[in-house]
Structure formats: C-alpha cells, structure tokens
Amino acid sequence: MISFLIKHKKSILIITLAFFIGSIVYLGLDSYSRGAFNTTAATVGGTEISYRQLYKVSEDRARAIRNQGIDVDEDMTKFIQQQVLAALISEEVLNQAAHKIGLNVADYEIAYDIQSAPQFNDNGRFNRQAYAYALKHSLGMTTTEFEEQLRKTKLADRFRGVLYSHYKLTPEEIKYSYKVQNGNMKDFEKNKAAFSANLLDTKMETAQKAFFDQFNNQVNIKTYLK
C-alpha cells in the first residue's frame, strides 16, 4: 500500500487540485462584497466557505507548484489563495444554480469515476483500502470529503454545460464579427476555424460573467479574505 501511495501521490494531488482550479471563472474576487469574519472566508447565500477549506486547498496548490521547482513567496501565496477562493465561490454558485433547475449527479457516476481512475487502481483493479489511505495521508481528506468534492465539481461542470448550450454561434454572426474585426472578408475561409473558436470563447466568458452578475444580484456573496 505504501508503494502504491508513493507511486501515485503526485497524480492523486493533481486530480484533486483540478477539481478546484477547473472551477475558476472569468470573474475576480473584487466583484463580491467584502466583510470580516474570523473563520469564514466567504459566504454564498447561506452557505459558508471556511478558511480551513481555503487554506487546505491553497497549501495543496502551493505544494504542487514547489514540486515544479518554483518558489512560493508571500505574494505568490496570496495570489494562490485569491484564485482558489474564486474557484470555491464559483463552484458553490454553479452548484446552487444547478440544484435550482433540478440537476444532480448520481452516486453511480461518482463510483465509476473513482473506480476507473488509474490513480486508484492497483494492477488494474480498484483498491478501496489504498484509495482511502492515499486520500488520508496524501491529501488529508476522507473518502466522504473527496467524493463530495468530486460531486460538486461534476455538478458545476454540468450546469456550465447547460449554460453554454444556450449560446451558439450562427454562420451569420461569425461572418459579421470577422468583417467588423478585420474590415473585410479576406482569408475568411482560411481563418474561419480559429476565429470561430476564439469568438466562442469570448462569448462564453461574457455569458458566464453575465450569469454571475445576475446571480450576485439575487444571492448575496461576501468574501472575507484580506
């Protein structure tokens, strides 16, 4: 079991960090109202995000950066905390919105993701004991905490997919935007694929920011990170 943990420690850490960092949206912490509270890093409606949770994820992220040979000084630590808190807030917002429209993540989906992950397999078979041991000693998490985080991340991604599905590019929109940006239609067919991808990214960022602005008008979001 020890050899299993040592072999997969880095991969397990990367997976968990990806759950959080993948939720960062095109929105800074300055968009939220601020206050001061000893144990709470942020609130989204009636849900609290604790400093314990924030510091734990931030420390994991800092450790991963140090493992890449990068120095993590005080300024970098503050930056990491800001980014992680933005990710945690984003994830909570998307989860609350998903619940409101009846989205959910089934237990079998969580089980499948964990049991099929090579990081939790020993010689091709899922090892529950090694899985629990790895989480506890590598990440300081219980299986319940890990699975709840995985569920929240999957639910956030599911709602994000629903949100994005309402914003599609039409051929006319692509041509119009290309002409506005370039002043003509020269090399349109040659550049169409790359231009369309960039235009869609911009549209998605705008849509997501608009959603968060609307959500913040309906549900009070406060941050307490100094």
Image: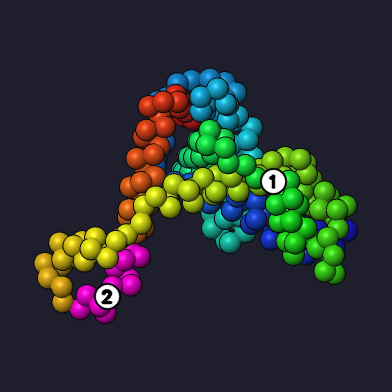
Q: Taking 37 as reference, is 13 left or right? A: right
Residue 92, position as x, y percentages in the image: 54, 36
User: Which residue is at 77% across, 48% downward?
Assistant: 135
Residues 13 and 88: in front is 88
Q: Taking 54 as reference, is 117 left or right? A: right
Which quadrant of the structure image shows residue 3?
bottom right
User: Which residue is at 86% across, 58% downward?
Assistant: 127
Looking at the image, what colour scheme do you see? rainbow
Q: In terms of sequence position, does the residue under pointer 2 or pointer 1 come before the other?
A: 1
- Magenta region, main secondary structure: helix
Q: Which mark is residue 191?
A: 2
- SS for tag 2? helix
Q: Which mark is residue 120?
A: none
Is mark 2 in CB contact (under 8 Å) with mark 1? no
User: Which residue is at 82% across, 69% downward?
Assistant: 124
Amino acid type, callout 1: Ala
User: Which residue is at 12% across, 70% downward?
Assistant: 184
Is residue 50 covered in magenta? no
Is residue 193 covered in magenta? yes
Per the image, the residue denoted by label 1 is 106
* Quarter of the figure that contains the N terminus: bottom right
Amino acid type, callout 2: Asn
Q: Magenta part of the protein: which range?
A: 187-198
Residue 49, position as x, y percentages in the image: 58, 30
Which quadrant of the structure image shows residue 201?
bottom left
- SS for tag 1? loop
Q: Is residue 96 above or below residue 8?
A: above
Residue 196 in view, yes or no: yes
Q: Is residue 57 above or below residue 223?
A: below
